[in-house]
Image (spheres, rainbow, N blue to C red):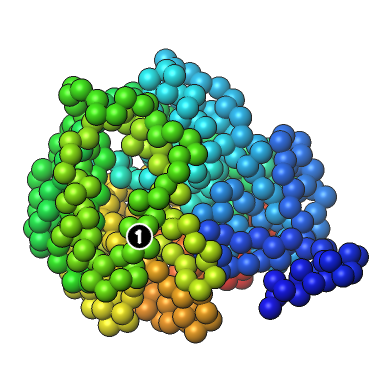
Amino acid sequence: MKLFLTLFFAFTFPAFPVFAKTTINDVTNINPIDVKKVVTPQSADEIRSAIKSSNGPISIGGGRFSMGGQTATENAIQIDMRSFNKIVKLDTQKKQVTVQAGIRWRDLQEEIDKHDLSVKIMQTYANFTVGGSLSVNVHGRYIGEGPLIRSVESIKLILADGREVTASRTENSDLFFSAIGGYGGIGVITEATLNLVPNKKIRREIKKMSVSEYKKYFMRSIRENKEAVLHNGDLYPPDYKEVSLETWYNTDKPLTTEAKMIPRNQKYWLEPNIISSISTVPFGSKLRSKIIDPIMHSKEVVVWRNYEASYDVAQLEPATPRLIFTYVLQEYFVPIDRFDNFIPKIRTILKKHDVNVINISIRHALPDSGSYLAWAPEEVFSFVIYYKQMTTQAAQEKVKAWTQELIDAALSMKGRYYLPYQIHATERQFKKSYTNFQKFFDVKKKYDPLNKFRNKLWDQYYK
């Protein structure tokens, strides 16, 4: 109805004030937010001008892959960073690169690949902006690594008063540890200097085992293996008792794919249709675990590290309008010694609420190096839940109920939940998960006393 009225007034009354606002949404399409306007700066001066000229809220957006309104709030000026996307400096000797925050990881990869270099830590998909990844302090599948902050040398950010400052572990450290993982609440991250690693050939190895065997096997055979580069375990619904391990190792074997990276704008049909099918047909998960995955994993694969790090989210997302159903992520972290205790809890809650889980990806992360809103204050296993839900308000309330149960389950294990997703956690759950929240709030109050930098996340928890 809202869309119909918007189109009706657009064609009937061109001056109707429906055009006074712009609607921002995210990849789930269930979080529409009307902002005052969107600005797309291409220079630091333009960012500074947008901040200083605004007397109201300011929000910051990148690829819009966060899933709960973390990039916007009502009546804000949204700074869309995607045109602020240059490589500032590449030092191949130090293996470091400085980039503007709006650059996509894919664009960075294409440049450093020319010098046989690779990103040290990033998320699985390359569509995200670097600034967005810093703001949520992403992680990936990298063995011996963890949160993105572990690979960051320094950042620059523009504060609420228009000053651009440099922040690192030794300079303005309070800003460094607040802005990384700070979801746009401290200022606009404009640049980042990141550490890089050599680009090498890697070989995929697949194993299947019961989830009860997983932790012991991982700690013995993967965590301590110096040749292991990437790893995740896929925990199969609906029983959550079998896990498929995908590990990538350094290798000297011949490439099975000559391309240095996945071609841009590749048309994906197989993976999205598989996701759509297994989330729709009866016994779809059994079909995947017993037939689809064994076929897809039957061949040996040897590729460049940059190839495996250049996935497009189009490979993940079914190409259907998100009107009735949508696909959403959640993530939970538990200390490594609580892994086996958490599995029964997550299994019970998901089965009780009949959640349409497509996959649970198990990852591993070493501790955070100091961010105030750290999700890994100690070594953890993470559980990335990818599921399908209806878009109705009733369905969203149902998701909220079982999400809060999962958060409490993680907290009972001295674990945490991840903030980039739907904002269902209570204030109690937020404060119990992110125990250094007051340090973050104090830094925000110091540098943003008028609370200019806002979004739905901080509208919820920063009072």
Numbered disc 1: secondary structure: helix
Residue 393 in sight:
yes
Where is residue 456? Give x, y as percent.
Answer: 60, 66
x and y percentages locating residue 458 in the rendered image? 59, 64
The percent coordinates of residue 99 (x first, y second) are 56, 31
Q: Residue at x 63, y 42 (%)?
A: 82
Tell me the residue at 57%/36% (across/down): 103
The C terminus, quarter of image = bottom right
Sort mark 1 into few (<14), some (14-19) or many (20+) by Cα contacts within 10 Å: many
Residue type, numbered disc 1: Ile
Q: Residue furthest top?
A: 93
Q: Nearer the viewer, residue 230 or 261?
A: 261
Instruction: Reply above or below: 412 against 169.
Output: below
Count the marks: 1
State left or right for residue 41 relative to residue 402.
Answer: right
Q: Is residue 379 above or below residue 424?
A: above
Q: Which image quadrant is residue 46 in?
A: top right
Residue at 26 percent across and 78 percent down: it is: 351
The structure residue drawn at horizontal position 19% and vertical position 66%, both measured from the top left corner, is 286
Placement of the N terminus among the 4 image quadrants: bottom right
Q: Position of residue 173 (x, y in %)?
A: 52, 42
Query: 398 or 47: which is nearer to us?
Result: 398
Res 176 visible: no
Q: Is residue 79 left or right of residue 49?
A: left
Question: Is 169 left or right of 142, judged from the image as shown?
Answer: right
Q: Tell me the residue that label 1 is attached to.
A: 275
